[in-house]
Amino acid sequence: MLFNSFDFFLFLLFVFAIFWLLPNNKKWVLLLISSYVFYMYWNPIYILLLLLTTIIDFYISLYLTSSDNPKRSRKGIVLSLILSLAILFSFKYIGFFLLISQQVLALIGIDYVIPEMNILLPMGISFYTFQSISYAIDVYRKDIKPERNFFYFSLYITYFPQLVAGPIERASQLLPQLKKKQFNFTSNHLKIGIFYIVWGLFLKVVIADNAAFIVDSIFDNLEGKTGGNLAYGALLFTFQIYTDFAGYSFMAIGISKLFDIQLMANFNSPFLSESVSDFWKRWHISLSNWVRDYIYIPLGGNRKGAYRTYINLFIAFVIIGIWHGASYNFIIWGFLHGLVMVCERVFKLNIATRFSLIRILKTVSTFLIITFIFISFRIENVHQLYTIYGRIFTLDWRDFLFFLSDNRYNFVFLGIFILLMVELYLKKMPLATLTKIPQYIFYPFCILLFFSIVFLGRAEGGQFIYFQF
Amino acid sequence: MKKTLIKIAVIFFSILIIDRIASAKLRDLYENNFCKHSGGDLNYYLKFQNADTIFLGSSRVSSMINTDSIGKNVLNVASKGKHFYYNSCVIHLMEKYKKLPRKVLILNLEAEDIYIENKSDLIDNVFYLKYYYDKVGFIKDRIDSKSPFEKYKFLLSSYKFNGENFLLATNQLQSICDDTHENYTPLYPTIYDSVKVLKGKKIQQKIKYTKFNDEFLNILQATNLVCRKNNVRLIIIYGPHYYYPKNFEHASFRVKSFCENNHIPYIDFNAKEFNQFKTIDSWFDIVHLNKKASLLYTKILKEELKKVDSLIKRNGN
């Protein structure tokens, strides 16, 4: 069930109404059932996989705490990691692994064609696997106590607003909220919830889906495309991927708010970042925190000298790249981010400054670097990347200006302008201040967003990009 | 609680009022839009044009058949990216507006129209006609078949204009309005064509069609009945392909059988006797002939239509 589908809204309306009619101690049951229904609506058989991941980490986590023997605990956590990652590998990475094997065999002169495997990638597998792993590690580290009720734990893994595209929530934050004895319905929750849902949907169906229409027409066929065309496509793609993913995350937060559950913010105005390091504190925050806490810091973080820090950064970002998908372009994407992060550290470019002009220049240059790197996210093979970068470096600005003179494209820019204005507002004002906006501004703005969705949104728009991760 | 209910009621009525006002304004914009985009071509035909013969299909008709050279009063009403479900809806729409051609309707089919794997895309195509949702029952049925909840979206009057408004608005600004209604938009060869064709072939080789869409024949039959009822001769053609997968033959065979059983003339330009388009230099990309080849195709098509005509006259059918 897609968040941008009408089916989902009817489903949400139904769950919301029943949720607040049920007594407090039964609400979690409804959320659990709804979450399973939500997932099975996509593909019923894959619920077994989700269930398997849940069972593995639930029982292994109980095993981890059943004795004080550290060796036994270590064995348990290794087993948990192997099993969880094996499931992820089997469904997400096996095809890529076979492709690499084939290429290596070809290098040593063995021409063996491995048959193509058409495995359907389970929706949200990377998200729920990482969430499940974080739980097991937290239990192993004794940061949290293991959950003893299988159904509560099951709800933590499958909670539908964030199941398929995050945020990747920590058990310490989400589990207590799912188990709480008293859920409070307030008009402020409703107000914030509705705003976030409408805002997220606006980002997805008005900006992302309309931008996708143009971006696809540029990148799906590179023949005859000039550097100007491709630079324009890259620029729009950066906004497309942000509005697509952030749109989903905002909706997830808004939906949860309707159930009096607070999810973590996954984005914090990333295009206003002043360095790439800053960007990663604002972009897909739940994933970057996950990699920081469970990979970068255990590797030594920045505690073991400069060179080791650089290596650790590279490892962390290549893993972030691989997490996104099983192909070379995502590895390149991660590698390039790692490279820029290392450069920023070496040349001390990530140090904050108070001079406004320098800050603006840093923000613009960071945005351009991010846009440039994001091209590797969009392409289908490495060869395309050479072609695109090659043409962009011979950019003819007249091509670029041609796009800006076309009103069709300017409407997308109008959407992006609204986006940046709201981003600036949200950057300065925390979430709670939304409720303090005068009603005569807040409600007309929501109605305006609603009609923008009806008039300008693509009702038959595609699924969220991050659903495939 | 009372305050919240009042707020909800105010928001609800505001939405209702804005919806009605906006849809009235958008209706004007839509009906007076004769630019190529966002249904303008179809509007133009429904309001201003009449023909003895019309061609319907996708860009493989608009860019590959020069109707001017086929005869007088022959129009090409095909639209880019519009396939069988859409075109059958257009035929029902033409019937409703009494704009069916006086003599012959030539419908170009594609193999993609025939397989269940593409059914969802074919239904999505019909959504370009959602303005006519409550005007033409056949269109309503196709849209409603998308999901049981589809009809509820139309409770909001302005939903009928969803997806069109960028273009409707920009057409008003007249910066990109292309109001030429040419019958034929040829594709001129470029140096990239052979690369595009080979790339397209690779993509097509990966596509696996497996299951016949049974609804296809029902819709074809409904289209045939509309033509019969209005004394319009329906002719079905299947344009040439550079790459022609084996299993397409099966689809072509089923369509051919249907046409024979219903006395509908059927011309398959992928049959062995039409081998003029097998060289790569005839193609602009994997599915479109370039200008030179399209003129040859038009010439062959004209001859074939003449043969059909004389056959019909001879048989008195």
Image (cartoon, rainbow, N blue to C red):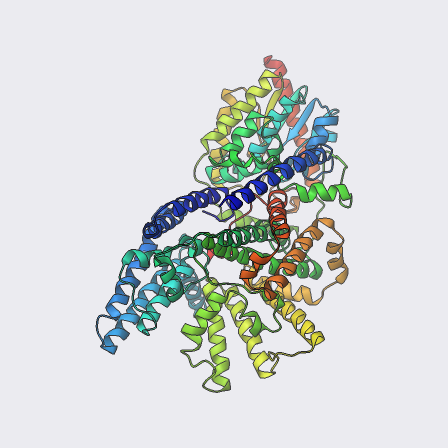
Residue B102 visible at all: yes
Looking at the image, the residue that sits furthest to the front is: B2
Residue B231, placed above or below residue A101: above
Count of numbered marks: 0
Q: Position of residue A250 (x, y in %)?
A: 52, 56
Residue at (68, 65) in percent of width and height: A392
User: Between residues A447 and B46, which one lies in front from this camera angle?
Assistant: A447
Residue A436, placed above or below residue B317: below
Looking at the image, the residue that sits furthest to the bottom is: A305
Q: Position of residue A413 (x, y in %)?
A: 68, 55
Residue at (58, 58) in percent of width and height: A436
Residue A89 visible at all: no
Residue at (26, 74) in percent of width and height: A73
Q: Quadrant of residue B186?
A: top right
Looking at the image, the residue that sits furthest to the top is: B316
User: Between residues B279 and A10, which one lies in front from this camera angle?
Assistant: A10
User: Between residues A360 and A28, which one lies in front from this camera angle?
Assistant: A28
Q: Position of residue A44 (x, y in %)?
A: 36, 46
Residue A165, placed above or below residue B274: below
Q: Position of residue A318 (x, y in %)?
A: 48, 71
Q: Quadrant of residue A416?
A: bottom right
Q: Quadrant of residue A180?
A: bottom left
User: Between residues A434 and B27, which one lies in front from this camera angle?
Assistant: A434
